[in-house]
Image (tube, helix red, strand yellow):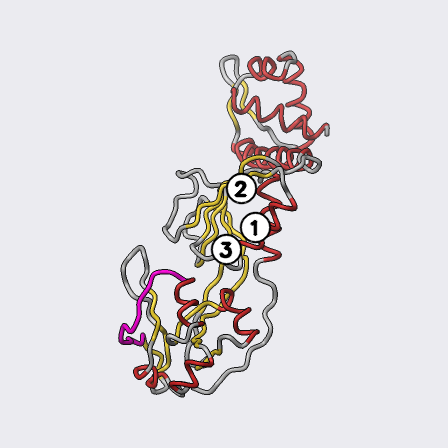
């Protein structure tokens, strides 16, 4: 702790360029400040300041040591803040933006609220790109990479896209055996709300991966609607595995052409970078990351 105190005295002198001003801030005499600096210089074996009757300026060694000293003091401050929050119960308003999907998030968030009743959740469900800092969010959950250097992120889990339909649909229309066969099927397509463009199904056609254009048999801009239509036997849909794993397990949906539809992504939770993460946000990040994407069971793949 004596060394930490010396670092603090040194930084104050470097920033004020005055033993008198540094002493005033630290509540000690200028003489005491000068002695602490001299002792530090002797211990390090270098001169940290050029001294004159009019000014105190850093030497080149002092400038280098100032950068390191600031980092050391910042780390100590962060550690103290972190330890002081260990016994603080998570509480307060937590504003989170999530994509327009119900699973796997809703039941996990409900579990979080039951576990931490003092945390007030303010949830915004949207597929638009939000500015976390400007719009005042504590955290945002999205797919893809983090392109904003102001943010810290944690990987939640990966997902895969699957071509699925109901057993009744395949009994009536047969299963597609290749990507070309999809041209003769009813395909339930997704239109991106932000751009109005149709989602492209990245399929292998004649052993070559291509952006496969399908006839618009039915188009909608909602995940739950596509799941519902597939369950009702309307046609084949291209859906993320996390949203339909229960239907696959129960046999209400059947996947086809898995080797042809090789696509997926990663969910991340992002929050503003900073010195400290509030207890309410820290427990939310841990809770949702541990529970939203449990290890998936292996699936069987049909030939393309």
Identified at 43% across, 71% down, the residue is 263
Circles 2 and 1: CB atoms closer than 8 Å: yes
Q: What quarter of the picture does the C terminus occupy? A: bottom left
Residue 262 x, y percent position in the rendering: 44, 75
**Dot label at residue 82:** none
Start and end of the magenta stretch?
211-223
Mark number, residue 268: 3
Q: Position of residue 168 (x, y in %)?
A: 44, 81
Q: CA distance from mark 2 to mark 3?
A: 19 Å
How crowded is the residue under tag 2: few (<14 C-alpha within 10 Å), some, or many (20+)? some
Q: Residue furthest right?
A: 1
**Which of the pair 245/156 is nearer the observer?**
245
Q: Which residue is mark 2?
A: 121
- Say if 111 sits above or below 25 in the image: below
Residue topped by disc 1: 109
| Circles 3 and 1: CB atoms closer than 8 Å | no
């Amino acid at each position: 702790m004596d060394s930490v105190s010396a670092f603090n005295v040194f930084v104050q002198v470097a920033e004020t360029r005055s033993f008198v001003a540094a002493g005033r801030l630290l509540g000690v005499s200028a003489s005491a400040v000068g002695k602490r600096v001299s002792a530090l210089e002797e211990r390090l074996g270098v001169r940290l300041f050029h001294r004159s009757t009019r000014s105190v300026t850093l030497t080149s060694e002092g400038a280098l040591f100032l950068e390191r000293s600031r980092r050391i003091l910042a780390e100590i401050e962060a550690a103290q803040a972190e330890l002081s929050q260990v016994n603080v119960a998570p509480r307060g308003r937590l504003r989170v933006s999530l994509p327009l999907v119900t699973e796997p998030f809703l039941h996990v968030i409900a579990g979080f609220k039951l576990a931490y009743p003092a945390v007030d959740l303010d949830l915004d469900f949207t597929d638009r790109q939000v500015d976390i800092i400007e719009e005042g969010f504590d955290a945002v959950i999205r797919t893809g990479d983090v392109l904003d250097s102001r943010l810290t992120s944690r990987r939640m889990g990966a997902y895969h896209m699957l071509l699925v339909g109901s057993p009744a649909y395949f009994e009536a229309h047969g299963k597609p055996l290749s990507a070309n066969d999809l041209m003769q099927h009813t395909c339930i397509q997704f239109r991106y709300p932000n751009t109005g463009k149709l989602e492209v199904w990245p399929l292998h056609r004649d052993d070559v991966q291509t952006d496969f254009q399908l006839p618009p048999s039915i188009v909608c801009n909602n995940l739950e609607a596509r799941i519902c239509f597939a369950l009702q036997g309307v046609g084949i849909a291209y859906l993320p595995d996390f949203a339909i794993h229960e239907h696959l397990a129960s046999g209400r949906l059947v996947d086809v052409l898995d080797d042809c539809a090789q696509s997926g992504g990663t969910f991340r939770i992002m929050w503003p970078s900073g010195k400290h993460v509030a207890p309410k946000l820290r427990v939310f990040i841990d809770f949702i990351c541990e529970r939203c994407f449990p290890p998936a069971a292996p699936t069987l793949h049909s030939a393309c």
